[in-house]
Image (cartoon, coloured by chain):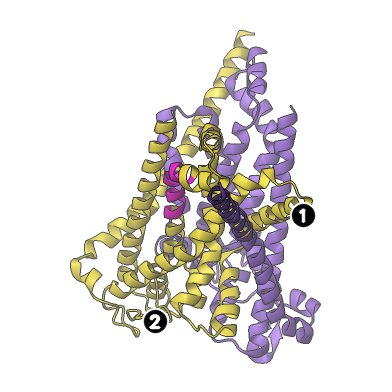
């Protein structure tokens, strides 16, 4: 009897220890996020102090040799390439999502879905290489002054393919979580399948679809290696070289992520700190984008649940 | 009326054609990218390519032996760090969190979930920057497999947590109830009943994470150093295959070798995806 109860005590002892150990590992993620934020911010402080937050964010010139550290050109580069990627990638991703959830017969989705999954799995360095070897020479043939092929257009195309899986997956999920009753109701009222998709299902899934696009934006802003390989990396504020405003996409540029990766290996002092500051700006930007996506997704799910 | 019905049918036909084309485009893009890399890369592959190390310097000469070794080390060490943490976190979040009574623990669970979601959205260059500041510099580990694995673990912890949670949730509640009714404690139930039946699902998560490490470049670009030599300990630097592709393309401009290395990389990823799909379809056929 006593040995039995001691045994029982040992078992509850293990039980409680494990519970604590598991809780601690559950908290590891939040600890890592905090550590990342604190460390990056700490390393960035000297730059913010010496250069000034505003001068850095709005400064047009990045010339570390000259102690000029403005990251506006990189903000513009990241913004434009993301815009380009969304413009190219979103229609294709949404089309694929609608196709997979509403139209494709089972065996066809059995081909399309794994293909999209594989696109998500291809390493970004491979996309970069593909961009350098295939897309850049192609873009170079567009006649425009100063067009070398490396630049926003090539980068946007590469990035569009890279964010396609994220946007397609999340929107497919959003479309699938539209209650069955909507679909049946619309069809029962005599609407065609296409009218049901266009006027009932997609509008009902809109918050989820928007959050999918915003999530894609977050992924696009964070992409590094493929961008370095095809965007040209020049620190200039992109501008149109011909009368056509779209020729701005033939301009070379540099992203926030690329700025960090290209220079961190040899930077010291304020220069190094300015790169960490670039990281802080990127981190905050992506946190804002991702949390708004999450907010949209949650509100769309809770609304769907109520209906 | 009849015409309107006809135009409505036409509209549907037109729209569906566009959607079919879009689905086909997604497949074609995949086939084009993978096919191009394979066609350009595979013809130059031979045994020597796998058994010799890169010559280094500005020549693109040599094979990929040392980069295969480094990739292997990186995958193993990163998984050793991330798997226990990720699986542990997932167990707590699925098996314990909902029954937690104390308001403090409930709040901690909410914070933990927020942490996982946030971590999943952090871009890899930030993990690199963090790893560079903390592990490479502050903790004096230098550019090494150790520094890079610690930074890489941050990237895959959310992946392990998410897939493990899915796997645990798919274990039927009757398993839990049966084990508890037999007098097993919660932890005994988890260790002897739930984890074994969730193992196939967890293993897909681990495979997926291994794929992420094989593909990752940005983190290792700033934490691994890029040495082309065979690593002799966890404190040596190195370059993974993915990093090697970057150096070949950007620094030595040896595009043929870059293509061959990329082909090996893509083949590896395709195999991993196949394995994941195989395990997943096994699981779903079993539960059916």
| Element on which disc 2 rests | loop
In this orientation, which residue lies closer to the viewer: A236 or B119?
A: B119
Left or right for B222, reference A200:
left
Mark 2, residues whose alpha carbon is within 10 Å: few (<14), some, or many (≥20)?
Answer: many
Q: Position of residue B250 (x, y in %)?
A: 43, 75
Image position of A194 with respect to B259: above or below: above
Q: Residues within 10 Å of mark 1 (few under 14, many from 20)?
A: few
Query: Can residue A164 be seen here?
Result: no
- Measuring from the top left, give residue B227's x and y in whole percent: 39, 81
Q: CA distance from mark 1 to mark 2?
A: 48 Å
The span shown in magenta is B195-207
Which chain has been coloured yellow in this picture? B
Chain letter corresponding to the colour purple: A
Mark 2 = which residue?
B227
Splitting the image into 4 quarters, where does residue A110 fall? top left
The structure residue drawn at horizontal position 22% and vertical position 72%, both measured from the top left corner, is B51
Instruction: Inspect the magenta stretch and tell me whether residue B201 lies in it.
Output: yes
Report the front residue among A164 and B238.
B238
The secondary structure type at the circle numbered 1 is: helix
Determine which quarter of the picture holds residue B267. bottom left
User: Which residue is located at x 46 percent, y 49 percent?
Assistant: B202
Does the rendering let one see residue B279?
A: yes
* Depicted A67 relative to depicted A254: above or below: below
**Residue A238 lies within the magenta run:** no
**Which of the two marks, 1 or 2, is nearer to us in this view?**
1
Q: Chain of mark 2?
A: B
């Amino acid at each position: 009897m006593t040995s039995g109860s001691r045994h029982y005590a040992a078992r509850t002892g293990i039980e409680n220890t494990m519970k604590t150990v598991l809780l601690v590992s559950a908290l590891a993620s939040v600890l890592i996020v905090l550590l990342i934020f604190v460390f990056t911010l700490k390393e960035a402080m000297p730059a913010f102090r010496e250069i000034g937050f505003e001068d850095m964010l709005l400064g047009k010139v990045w010339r570390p040799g000259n102690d000029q550290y403005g990251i506006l050109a990189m903000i513009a580069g990241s913004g434009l390439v993301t815009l380009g990627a969304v413009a190219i990638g979103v229609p294709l991703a949404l089309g694929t999502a609608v196709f997979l959830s509403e139209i494709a017969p089972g065996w066809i989705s059995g081909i399309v879905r794994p293909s999209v999954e594989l696109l998500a799995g291809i390493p970004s360095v491979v996309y970069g290489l593909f961009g350098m070897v295939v897309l850049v020479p192609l873009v170079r043939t567009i006649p425009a002054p100063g067009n070398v092929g490396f630049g926003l257009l090539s980068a946007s195309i590469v990035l569009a393919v890279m964010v396609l899986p994220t946007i397609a997956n999340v929107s497919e999920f959003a479309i699938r979580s539209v209650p069955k009753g909507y679909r049946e109701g619309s069809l029962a009222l005599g609407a065609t399948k296409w009218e049901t998709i266009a006027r009932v299902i997609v509008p009902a899934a809109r918050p989820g679809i928007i959050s999918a696009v915003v999530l894609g934006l977050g992924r696009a802003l964070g992409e590094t290696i493929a961008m370095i390989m095809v965007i040209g990396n020049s620190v200039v504020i992109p501008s149109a070289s011909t009368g056509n405003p779209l020729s701005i996409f033939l301009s070379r540029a540099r992203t926030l992520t690329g700025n960090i990766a290209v220079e961190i290996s040899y930077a010291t002092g304020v220069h190094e700190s300015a790169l960490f500051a670039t990281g802080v700006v990127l981190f905050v930007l992506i946190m804002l984008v991702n949390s708004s996506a999450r907010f949209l997704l949650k509100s769309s799910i809770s609304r769907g649940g109520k209906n | 009326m009849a015409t309107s019905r006809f135009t409505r049918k036409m509209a549907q036909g037109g729209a569906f054609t566009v959607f079919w084309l879009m689905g086909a485009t997604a497949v074609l893009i995949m086939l084009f990218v993978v096919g191009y890399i394979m066609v350009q890369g595979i013809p130059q592959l031979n045994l020597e390519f796998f058994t010799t190390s890169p010559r280094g310097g500005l020549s693109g000469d040599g094979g990929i032996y040392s980069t295969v070794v480094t990739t292997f080390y990186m995958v193993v060490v990163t998984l050793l760090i991330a798997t226990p943490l990720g699986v542990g976190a997932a167990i707590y979040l699925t098996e314990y969190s909902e029954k937690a009574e104390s308001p403090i623990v409930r709040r901690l669970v909410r914070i933990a979930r927020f942490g996982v979601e946030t971590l999943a959205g952090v871009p890899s260059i930030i993990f690199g920057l963090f790893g560079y500041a903390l592990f490479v510099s502050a903790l004096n580990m230098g550019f090494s497999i150790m520094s890079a694995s610690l930074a890489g673990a941050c990237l895959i912890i959310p992946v392990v947590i998410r897939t493990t949670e899915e796997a645990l949730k798919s274990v039927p509640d009757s398993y839990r109830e049966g084990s508890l009714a037999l007098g097993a404690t919660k932890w005994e139930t988890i260790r002897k009943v739930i984890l074994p039946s969730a193992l196939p699902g967890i293993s897909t998560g681990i495979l997926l994470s291994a794929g992420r490490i094989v593909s990752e470049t940005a983190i290792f670009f700033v934490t691994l150093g890029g040495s082309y030599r065979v690593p002799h300990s966890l404190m040596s630097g190195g370059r993974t295959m993915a990093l090697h592709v970057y150096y070949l393309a950007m620094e030595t401009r040896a595009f043929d070798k870059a293509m061959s290395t990329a082909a090996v990389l893509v083949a590896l990823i395709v195999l991993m995806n196949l394995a994941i799909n195989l395990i997943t379809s096994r699981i779903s056929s079993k539960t059916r």
